[in-house]
């Protein structure tokens, strides 16, 4: 397993004229559908133009214990591409039994996350020729919400984004939706990024942020909500949703009704100088699904 090298990504992007980022959302290792997960990683390893994979949190299945981290590492070693792992709630928020971990418990799980994947920090910036990328992680030690970043990380992010003079893309476990989107269903408060008001303010004050990439919702691309940009935006910023890799997804609207299934999709971002293309690969039929392609012009 190799962590992304800034200089290599920069050089390859310039040479190709674009950057290909594979998103792996909510794999929940070891979890369900083991063989299908392995095949996803083996298939992606054959795609020559991938610059790196972004693993969007909930890498561990339930509570981020040592056995789950060992399984996660074993699975990700099958991917012969550089990657950037970011933490989700199942990596550091829960104790066994889905109880919120204590601050000390969360601290230990965050350390285990960093040690397992060889990370000096949970968050980082990647500078490309045409974009700046920001990878944020769940790391609050005392929040009651599932997907919260700490004050120190929030400060780092705001300082960095204020300096950005390029279109900027944020990668985080949970989406950053407008308040009106989840107000009608209070339970959805746990399925958005926090601190919500502060992050929304930063987005509004920094128009360089054009896109927020996330998992967490376990929403399938067959769900009409997946592509509803009016419902999943935050101001002018677009939320790019990604389905889980655990076969436990929401197919019917903005509900919390999960269905078990055997389907597996991954989404890829192709970052060009003047546009971003988002494409979805069906790992069961082994084909790109053209009807789900989306293209966004970038000025």
Image (cartoon, rainbow, N blue to C red):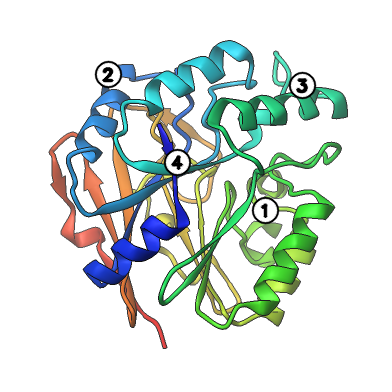
Q: Which mark is residue 99?
A: 3
Alpha carbon separation for disc pair 1 and 4? 15 Å
Q: Residues within 10 Å of mark 2 (few under 14, many from 20)?
A: few
- For this orientation, the residue located farthest to the top is 67
Q: Secondary structure at mark 2?
A: helix
Q: Quadrant of the N terminus?
A: top left
Alpha carbon separation for disc pair 1 and 2? 31 Å
- Of label 4 and label 3, which has the lower sequence position? 4
Labels 4 & 3 near each other (Cβ < 8 A): no
Alpha carbon separation for disc pair 1 and 3? 20 Å
Q: Which mark is residue 25?
A: 4
Residue at the (51%, 80%) spot, across then down: 166
Mark count: 4
Provide residue 284's location: percent of width, then percent of height: 18, 34
- Of label 4 and label 2, which has the lower sequence position? 4
Q: Which residue is mark 2?
A: 35
Q: Which residue is mark 1?
A: 193
Labels 2 & 3 near each other (Cβ < 8 A): no
- Of label 1 and label 4, which has the lower sequence position? 4
């Amino acid at each position: 397993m190799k962590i992304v090298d800034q200089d290599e990504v920069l050089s390859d992007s310039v040479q190709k004229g674009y950057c290909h980022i594979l998103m792996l959302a909510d794999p929940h290792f070891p979890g369900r559908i083991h063989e299908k997960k392995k095949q996803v990683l083996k298939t992606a390893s054959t795609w020559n133009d991938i610059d790196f994979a972004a693993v969007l949190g909930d890498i561990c299945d339930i509570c981020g214990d040592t056995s789950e981290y060992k399984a996660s590492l074993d699975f990700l070693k099958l991917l012969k591409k550089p990657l950037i792992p970011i933490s989700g709630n199942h990596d550091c928020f829960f104790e066994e039994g889905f109880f919120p971990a204590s601050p000390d418990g969360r601290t230990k799980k965050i350390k285990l996350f960093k040690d397992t994947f060889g990370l000096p920090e949970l968050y980082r910036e990647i500078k490309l020729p045409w974009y700046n990328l920001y990878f944020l992680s769940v790391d609050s030690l005392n929040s009651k919400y599932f997907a919260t970043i700490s004050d120190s990380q929030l400060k780092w992010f705001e300082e960095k984004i204020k300096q950005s003079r390029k279109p900027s893309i944020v990668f985080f476990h949970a989406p950053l939706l407008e308040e009106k989107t989840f107000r009608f269903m209070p339970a959805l408060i746990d399925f958005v990024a926090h601190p919500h008001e502060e992050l929304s303010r930063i987005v509004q004050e920094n128009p360089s942020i054009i896109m927020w990439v996330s998992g967490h919702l376990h929403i399938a691309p067959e769900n009409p909500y997946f592509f509803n940009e009016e419902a999943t935006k935050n101001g002018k910023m677009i939320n790019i949703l990604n389905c889980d890799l655990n076969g436990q997804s929401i197919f019917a609207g903005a509900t919390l009704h999960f269905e078990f299934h055997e389907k597996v999709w991954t989404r890829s971002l192709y970052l060009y100088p003047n546009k971003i293309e988002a494409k979805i690969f069906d790992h069961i039929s082994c084909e790109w699904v053209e009807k789900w392609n989306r293209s966004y012009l970038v000025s």
